[in-house]
Amino acid sequence: MRPEVLNPLFAEITALHGVGNQLAKPLDRLGLSRVVDLLFHLPTGWIDRLPREELDVADAGRVIAIALTPLSYRIGTSARAPARVQAVDAQGNHVSLVYFRANSGWVKKLFPLNEPRFVSGKLETYGQELQIIHPDIVCSPGEASETRERDAIYPLSEGITSKRIAGLVEQAIERAPELPEWIEPSLLAQHGWPRWHEALARIHADPADGKARERLAYDEIFATQLALLLVRGEARAKRGKALKGDGRLRDALKLPYAPTGAQARSIAEIEGDMQQQRPMLRMLQGDVGSGKTLVAAMALLIAAEAGAQSAFLAPTEILARQHYETLSKLLAGLDIRIAILTGRDKGSARESTLMGLASGEIDILIGTHAIFQEGVIYRDLGLVVVDEQHRFGVAQRMLLQAKAERPPHLLVMTATPIPRTLTLAQYGEMDVSRLDEMPPGREPIETRVVSEERLSEVVEALGRHLDGGGQAYWVCPLVEESEKSDMAAAEARAEALRSRFGDRVGLVHGRMKGPEKDAVMARFASGELGVLVATTVIEVGVDVPNARLIVIEHADRFGLAQLHQLRGRVGRGGGQSICLLLRGGQLSETSRARLALMRETNDGFRIAEEDLRLRGAGELLGTRQSGDMQFRLATPETLTELLPAANGDARLLIDRDGGLHGERGEAARLALYLFERESAVSLLRSG
């Protein structure tokens, strides 16, 4: 259970004064549904109000704060005409205070003639006049002392202002308790950081306060590192089954080429892990085409040699069937039985698979989440391999462990090269093996950047490619953060290509139902379709060796990691593959740098490091996946800078300071709950 001292922070936002259903809606659009969400909704900038005694044209373009006296009104007769208040400063200099679409009575009430008013807003010139349009502060001189010289600017949604958010944040800070310190004292002193509550108050009052911002980012990183170390410790404390293979199956395997050094190293690391009673918890990182399947196959053979069963989990049915075919070919001729189980398998075929699994006749089961459903019983599950994209969180791991008498060994594969910093931040509880070299004979994908003005030439080139028996992907532009608009763009492009190439063009998008999407992708995989038009919201990772061309529209709108993943859809067969990046006319410096790097290199790990450097804080960890730990306060820069210290501090807490049970541990437990990393506590059954 969450500690009571934190309850005021996790109350609904409607508990704050002035937040009713109407205001709750724009707040909810910002993801602000609880008091703690407001506290962590940090300002992205600020406005400095320059106190002035006298109006000066040199201040045009800046926000000033000044005492003015209204002298007259100029109210237009039409609804569109602005209301103007003519006012003077103490020296008699004139300024117009302008309001558009304002009620004239309201304006006159706000500015009684000849009564001084304290006004703040952006000073501008209009012809020979000075003016302030829609001043954001108007009050009596007596209330001027309550105005801050620096105001925070918050991320907003329609229906709410920064001033309103700031007022709610003040209430939230008043509710926030003083919490005991969880940072190691010498580290706190070394950085000169304020205490947690003080840091919150300071960052909202002065968004330029670097120490306060750094302290809060550190807290979030520390809580994440502590959670990952606790999960890792819990996993390592459990006793699994040591799986030591005798090599008979691996020796009988006839490979077309010798494994790369990276593959051999990764296989040795996995074999060493599986020989321990402590369950393996390892992530295999490798670019598209680096040979992850071979490494996974060796792990599956080690388990079979040791008399244990393996489960291979894929994110989609079509990818599960692809893995089944690949492994069946690779392991053909060996004394090993492979089966597949997906949601589509029914009746006697399903029953036969379940019986073979329960009796131990099936050595390797490949499938989707169906392989962990109730009624799927393993005789002796010793290894689980989890494929690309599937973020395997704590909840799924517990479900998996329920299928085995003892915790099985776990190997998670990802084809998204992840910078070392993010690997430690996101998967710190896992050991990592990296496939950072390509198997021999695999040709780099040739990447070209083409202006969208040459679209007709690209379509003609696509026609020649199809006439030569080739296939191609066409990825549609990222219109905005909306599946609907992306879908509309894809449908329009598919229609345009169909007018040229007829029914050889297929379309897949995120709003299609699973079976419908699978059917189109299967037609493409079989060669029935020549072009697969796709939005970016779906994974088009079907292995189609004949697809050696990919066209990506509006490539300048994508991040590097996404471009690299899309490019990896081709180059899976023999021969030269080509990636065409269609760019817009106006390129930002960042977009230009991204496209240049894509043209220059196929190295996913280099691209991932550069992507982290180029991206903004809001894109840090991409789209949310189950099992991910999201960062709200840490940016890529602070993560890179503070993560080593946070990891060391968390280790010190566990190794020297008694874990969660000492005085600092009790404070750290609060941090875990505060940053919603409490799954680590519940895992230990000590929360």
Image (tube, grey):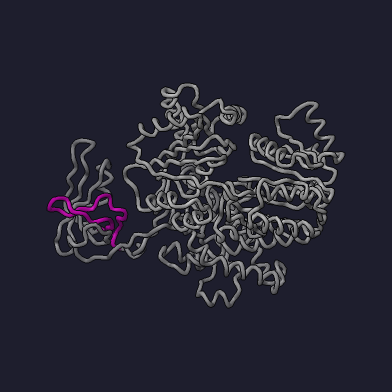
Q: Quadrant of the N terminus?
A: bottom right
Which residue is nearer to you in this view: 488 or 281?
281
Residue 93, percent from left and from top: 14, 60
Can see residue 48? yes
Q: Residue at x 56, y 55 (%)?
A: 418
Residue 658, percent from left and from top: 72, 71
Is 466 contained in the magenta span?
Answer: no
Is 124 contained in the magenta span?
Answer: yes
Q: Residue at x 39, y 53 (%)?
A: 593
Residue 50: image quadrant is bottom left
Residue 59, compared with residue 294, is above or below; it is below
Instruction: Tell me the magenta residue range.
Output: 117-141
Residue 596, percent from left and from top: 40, 51
Q: Quadrant of the C terminus?
A: bottom right
Residue 437 located left or right of residue 241: left
Residue 676: image quadrant is bottom right
Can see residue 369? no
Prevailing secondary structure class for the magenta stretch in the rendered image: strand
Residue 602, percent from left and from top: 50, 50
